Image (tube, helix red, strand yellow):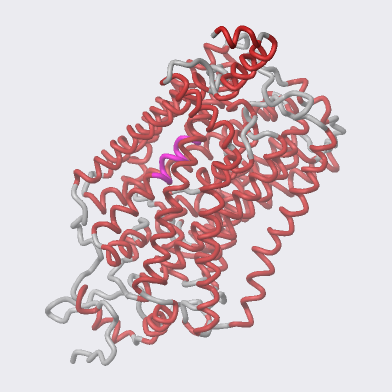
């Protein structure tokens, strides 16, 4: 006997009988896919290369040396530093996985994704200013490891650094290729190879400076799409009250009603609990999506926090951004970048992620795990235009982070492998050549590696949870290296390797104990991933502390650290007395330390505790929650778009005036032209008779 639905879902008639949202039929043509993947890649390559060239020719900035290629002159300002941090930290997972956890856990998912991945950037600001104090000449984090702890530690942390770069790039390509295939039909294997090419072209041509310029443009486009999606969900098409009512309706259905909703034309159900958003949410207070009291949501939050410490503190790209920033901008840039980045997963997933469950779109767990929640909702809201916007947004995230990862790997190989072990007397030209070759090679390698991971059966969500198991054990030793004079090099090596081994053992044992077997599926459960992540970071931290405190205590003089790091070329930009003022550096360190710790406590302790008394959100409480998400999204978009332009207005005007002078057959930029006019005026004053004669 079939169940009669008295109150069907909002989109019941439109999607009736569908077992999944996309159903193997992409909403966009293959041509659109190739246009975005190849066209945007070529466009950004040409544009950023021209901008770097214009900066060199018309503003008179230095030509690209190996130092400049890998450090961008060490003089990047606060706004651009923040923009680059937002760009680097906006992975495919940020856009896709954040909405997946909203689909799974409700309002707690976007919050824990955002807060659990913001605090690492805030706290890395402390390391950024420490780096400016004790190792301003560094090119990579592993150079600092080598300068303080020697060869064995250097090789150890080089391994973890490469692991971090490979894992992050894998997630970019896994999520990106799956979404490109779902939206356009372009084969994911082909997409995995084509996506890196846009990155390869402009990164190898312009180095870190080109990466920073492109990252700013990518960030602006990402925020533009973010604002569009928030506006569509909560202002134009629906309201917070409507979404609230739909979410209440979703969890009100019984199993029998869910089976009736998800059934075929013959009345045979394909509903499996947990495979679709229907009925009460397991582990949530009152079975509701509208609560922060979610056991699985909290568990995801802890995994997110631990795993993301690894992908910030062990990822060379964040150290490289700190190296590139001017000392006065490093601390503020990381703090502002973290605050603005919070809006992307929080605001996007609070709109698209919650709407997917509110409308009960036929999104399967497999589709959600592959990151297809945002494109599904965008397609429902805006048709092909929505799918195209998500595709563009995703491509921006992939190439911005991909370019940062490429330049990070090229720096590690150029300075920590080639120069350190093969050619200690390498010239700037040789370093530059190696850097460019590595960028091309790494892009090709990652295309192959992403295909292998997909064939094994690993998707974006699985790799995202797994990353902390591999690289979490390197986090605390690296923090200690920069902040603790007693930190032992031997202890760091033992802690990093022991933490990794213990984490893998705990992870495998957890899967065996929980499910009775070890497989991709059993290794990917929240409980098993949580055990591996926690063991990695906590065991290594404990081992390093005990070894450094009681077995091999050091008394390292941080003043000696920078003396062990040498420049390839004598490029002292960003290393002058003004930038290395110890008073200013101490002031900046106090500034970021206080604010970094306070904001961290607010985001992961105070905010969640304040939301507990609310239990299941009321309609007005949810409206306030949505208002915070909207305001944060708009505020971050305005800040990250206009602050870099305001700070760099003088440099932009120099380039534009230089171009104008070139077109009008004058020489120099605005400054030089104004000087020429001043000289002419002085000559006229000194020789008035000449003026009359003329």
Q: Quadrant of residue 42?
A: top left
Q: Quadrant of residue 264?
A: bottom left
Taking depth in this image into account, of 98 and 544 the one nearest to the observer is: 98
Residue at (50%, 51%) from the top-left corner? 466
Side of 166 relative to 579 (left or right): left
Side of 554 relative to 189 (left or right): right
Any part of residue 4 in sight: yes
Q: Quadrant of residue 71?
A: top right
Q: How many marks?
A: 0
The percent position of residue 278, horizontal first and vertical second, equals 35, 78
Residue at (64%, 29%) from the top-left corner? 74
Residue at (68%, 30%) from the top-left corner? 153
Note whether 683 is above or below 136 in the view shown. above
Residue 402 shown in magenta = yes
The percent position of residue 646, horizontal first and vertical second, equals 58, 42
Note whether 353 is above or below 557 in the view shown. below
Any part of residue 448 in sight: no
Residue span colored magenta: 396-404
The percent position of residue 114, horizontal first and vertical second, equals 55, 59
Quadrant location of the C terminus?
top right
The percent position of residue 658, horizontal first and vertical second, equals 50, 23
Residue at (34%, 87%) from the top-left corner? 254
Q: Main secondary structure of the magenta part?
A: helix
Residue 16 shown in magenta = no
Quadrant location of the N terminus?
bottom left
Side of 304 relative to 541 (left or right): left
Note whether 630 is above or below 454 in the view shown. below
Taking depth in this image into account, of 223 and 465 the one nearest to the observer is: 223
């Amino acid at each position: 006997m079939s169940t009669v639905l008295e109150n069907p879902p909002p989109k019941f008639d439109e999607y009736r009988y569908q077992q999944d949202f996309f159903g193997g039929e992409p909403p966009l043509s293959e041509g659109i896919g190739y246009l975005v993947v190849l066209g945007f890649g070529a466009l950004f390559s040409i544009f950023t290369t021209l901008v770097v060239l214009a900066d060199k020719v018309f503003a008179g900035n230095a030509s690209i040396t190996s130092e400049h290629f890998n450090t961008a002159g060490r003089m990047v300002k606060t706004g651009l530093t923040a923009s680059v941090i937002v760009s680097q930290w906006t992975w495919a997972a940020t856009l896709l996985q954040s909405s997946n956890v909203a689909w799974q856990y409700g309002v707690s998912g976007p919050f824990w994704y955002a807060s659990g991945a913001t605090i690492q950037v805030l706290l890395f600001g402390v390391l950024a200013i420490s780096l400016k104090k004790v190792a301003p000449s560094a090119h990579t984090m592993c150079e600092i490891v080598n300068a303080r702890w020697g060869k064995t530690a250097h090789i150890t942390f080089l391994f973890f650094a490469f692991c971090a770069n490979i894992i992050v790039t894998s997630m970019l390509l896994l999520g990106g290729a799956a979404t490109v295939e779902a939206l356009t039909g372009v084969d994911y294997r082909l997409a995995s190879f084509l996506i890196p090419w846009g990155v390869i072209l402009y990164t190898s041509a312009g180095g870190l400076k080109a990466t920073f310029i492109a990252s700013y443009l990518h960030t602006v486009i990402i925020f533009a799409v973010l604002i569009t999606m928030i506006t569509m969900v909560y202002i134009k098409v629906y309201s917070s009250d409507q979404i609230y009512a739909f979410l209440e309706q979703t969890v009100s259905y019984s199993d029998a009603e869910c089976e009736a909703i998800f059934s075929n034309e013959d009345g045979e159900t394909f509903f499996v609990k947990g495979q679709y958003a229907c009925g009460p949410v397991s582990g949530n207070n009152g079975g509701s999506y509208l609560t922060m009291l979610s056991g699985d949501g909290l568990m995801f939050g802890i995994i997110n926090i631990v795993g993301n410490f690894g992908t910030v503190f062990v990822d060379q790209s964040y150290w490289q951004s700190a190296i590139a920033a001017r000392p006065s901008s490093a601390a503020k840039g990381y703090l502002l970048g973290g605050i603005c980045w919070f809006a992307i997963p929080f605001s996007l997933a609070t709109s698209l992620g919650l709407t997917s469950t509110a409308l009960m779109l036929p999104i399967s767990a497999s589709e959600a795990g592959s990151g297809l929640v945002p494109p599904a909702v965008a397609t429902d809201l805006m048709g092909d235009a929505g799918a195209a916007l998500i595709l563009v947004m995703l491509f921006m995230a992939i190439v911005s982070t991909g370019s940062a990862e490429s330049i990070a790997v090229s720096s590690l190989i150029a300075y920590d492998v080639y120069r350190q072990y093969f050619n200690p007397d390498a010239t700037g030209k040789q370093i530059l050549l190696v850097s460019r070759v590595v960028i091309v090679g790494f892009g090709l390698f990652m295309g192959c590696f992403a295909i292998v991971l997909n064939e094994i059966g690993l998707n974006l969500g699985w790799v995202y949870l797994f990353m902390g198991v591999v690289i979490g054990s390197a986090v605390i030793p690296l923090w200690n290296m920069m902040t603790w004079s007693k930190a032992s090099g031997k202890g760091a090596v033992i802690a990093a390797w022991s933490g990794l081994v213990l984490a893998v053992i705990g992870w495998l044992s957890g899967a065996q104990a929980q499910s009775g077997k070890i497989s991709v599926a059993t290794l990917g459960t929240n409980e098993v991933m949580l055990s591996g992540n926690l063991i990695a970071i906590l065991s290594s931290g404990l081992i390093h502390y005990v070894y450094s405190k009681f077995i091999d205590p050091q008394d390292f003089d941080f003043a000696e650290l920078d003396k062990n790091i040498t420049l390839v070329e004598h490029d002292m930009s960003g290393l002058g007395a003004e930038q290395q003022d110890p008073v200013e550096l101490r002031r900046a360190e106090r500034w970021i330390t206080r604010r970094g710790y306070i904001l961290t406590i607010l985001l992961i302790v105070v905010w969640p505790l304040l939301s507990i008394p609310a239990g299941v959100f009321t309609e007005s409480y949810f409206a306030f929650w949505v208002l915070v998400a909207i305001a944060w999204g708009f505020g971050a978009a305005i800040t990250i778009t206009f602050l870099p332009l305001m700070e760099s207005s003088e440099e932009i005007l120099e380039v534009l005036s230089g171009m104008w002078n070139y077109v009008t057959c004058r020489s120099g930029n605005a400054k030089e032209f104004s000087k020429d006019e001043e000289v002419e005026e002085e000559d006229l004053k000194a020789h008035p008779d000449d003026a009359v004669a003329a």
